[in-house]
Image (cartoon, rainbow, N blue to C red):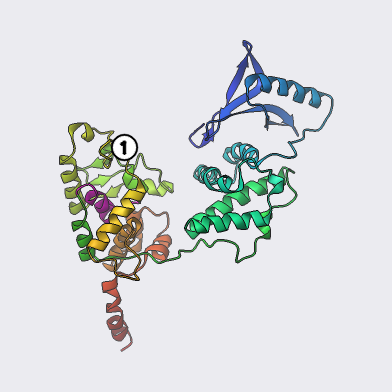
């Protein structure tokens, strides 16, 4: 387990006594791993053990320390599995001075456990992974219709793990470096986002049920990400100050934690939504958006509801990308920029760290604005 993005180690107590330097921690998948602090190059480091029980850990510790006392060099297991390499990499990646941010480590651990290991095999020896295996991984993920950026993240996480294995002497080279350029997934968008104008947003909202309409309004009028909206509690909604806070959301950056101003339309939607909730669901710690059973909504259900409403509102003609939840955030940004709002202000509303990000990613045009481009050119080139 981890606290604040860093793993929590506890001293191992066995047979009624503590064993100096012997520690354990829980991994994200519920296993207990053991480490022994040892002196290497005048520095104290945690050496991973193969033990799975306190008794085995104590026995392995005794052998390890006896070997070191006899002058034997410290040798990392020469044939660890991908899972074992991950168990060595994660504490290193979370340690102070690591090149990785805690959220990056969280992402890498998630995609390794749920995707890379699922396809390659968690118990596969790291030394046995070849470029052909990575191509098979990519082909499988593409067949599952994972986005290019998501596949890119998975391969990047695996490359970081194998690069670590090279530095530790576990493998000779990183097989991801043998992938051809065409093999590597692209992080670029496969399709451009949709930009809706205000009338189209209203048409979309009109086709949504009272369960989904206020959530879509938060995306469109507050420019929140789906994950941020689903994490909102009523304590985060300040009707008096007219702002939303994101205290409970897993935001992308520190800038993303800035308060979000509420428009009158958004406040009205949320007030109406709250009035429909039972008293138990109006408590400060209650989720703003939850199922009938009181559990958080699944983001895939949000996407399905918005796509269906887009079709009902005739916003999804054949050959056009169907409206998706994140398109509402894009639309909010596009409408603000089209209205002449300064990019720095738009960046503040979207909670970006840099206004250049806003212009580069969210500077698209709604369809009604494209018709104005010719008139703009005519006026500018006279």
Please, is residue 24 above or below residue 274 in the view? above
User: Residue drawn 67% across and 58% down?
Assistant: 177
Q: Mark 1 points at which residue?
A: 295
Residue drawn at (48%, 35%) of the image = 4
Q: Determine if residue 223 is in view.
A: no
Quarter of the figure with residue 44: top right
Determine the residue located farthest toward the top in the rendered image. 16
Does residue 213 show up magenta in the picture?
Answer: yes
Q: Please tell me how crowded label 1 is: few (under 14), some (14-19), or many (20+) other residues with Cα within 10 Å.
A: few
Give percent across and percent down for residue 357. 42, 60
Classify residue 378 as left or right of residue 34: left
Residue at image location 43% in from the left, 48% down from the top: 252
Where is residue 341 shown, x and y percent of the image? 29, 64
Is the residue 182 above or below the residue 48 in the image?
below
Which region of the structure is painted magenta? 210-225
Q: Is residue 24 magenta?
A: no
């Amino acid at each position: 387990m981890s606290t604040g993005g860093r793993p929590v180690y506890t001293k191992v107590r066995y047979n009624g006594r503590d064993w100096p330097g012997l520690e354990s921690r829980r991994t994200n998948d519920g296993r207990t791993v053991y480490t022994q602090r040892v002196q290497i190059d005048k520095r104290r480091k945690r050496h991973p053990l193969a033990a799975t029980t306190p008794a085995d850990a104590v026995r392995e510790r005794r052998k390890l320390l006896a070997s070191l006392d006899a002058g034997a060099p410290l040798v990392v297991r020469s044939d660890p599995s991908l899972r074992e390499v991950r168990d060595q990499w994660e504490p290193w990646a979370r340690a102070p001075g690591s090149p990785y941010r805690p959220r990056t480590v969280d992402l890498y651990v998630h995609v390794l456990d749920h995707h890379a290991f699922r396809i390659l095999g968690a118990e596969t020896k790291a030394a046995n992974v070849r470029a052909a295996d990575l191509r098979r991984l990519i082909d499988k993920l593409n067949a599952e219709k994972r986005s290019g950026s998501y596949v890119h993240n998975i391969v990047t996480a695996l490359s970081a793990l194998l690069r670590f294995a090279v530095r530790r002497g576990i493998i000779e080279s990183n097989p991801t470096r043998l992938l051809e350029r065409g093999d590597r997934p692209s992080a670029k968008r496969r399709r451009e986002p949709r930009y809706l104008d205000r009338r189209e947003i209203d048409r979309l909202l009109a086709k949504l049920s009272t369960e989904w309409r206020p959530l879509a309004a938060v995306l469109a009028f507050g420019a929140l990400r789906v994950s941020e909206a689903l994490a909102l509690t009523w304590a985060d909604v300040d009707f008096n100050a007219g702002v939303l806070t994101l205290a409970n959301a897993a935001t992308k950056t520190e800038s993303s934690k800035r308060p979000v101003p509420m428009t009158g339309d958004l406040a009205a939607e949320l007030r109406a939504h709250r009035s429909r909730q039972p008293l138990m669901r109006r408590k400060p710690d209650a989720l703003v958006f939850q199922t009938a059973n009181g559990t958080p909504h699944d983001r895939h259900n949000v996407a399905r509801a918005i796509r269906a409403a887009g079709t009902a509102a005739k916003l999804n003609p054949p050959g056009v990308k169907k409206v998706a939840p994140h398109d509402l955030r894009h639309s909010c940004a596009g409408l603000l920029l089209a209205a002449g709002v300064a990019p720095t202000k738009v960046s503040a509303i979207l909670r970006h760290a840099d206004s250049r990000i806003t212009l580069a990613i969210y500077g698209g045009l709604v369809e009604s604005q494209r018709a104005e481009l010719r008139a703009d050119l005519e006026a500018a080139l006279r």
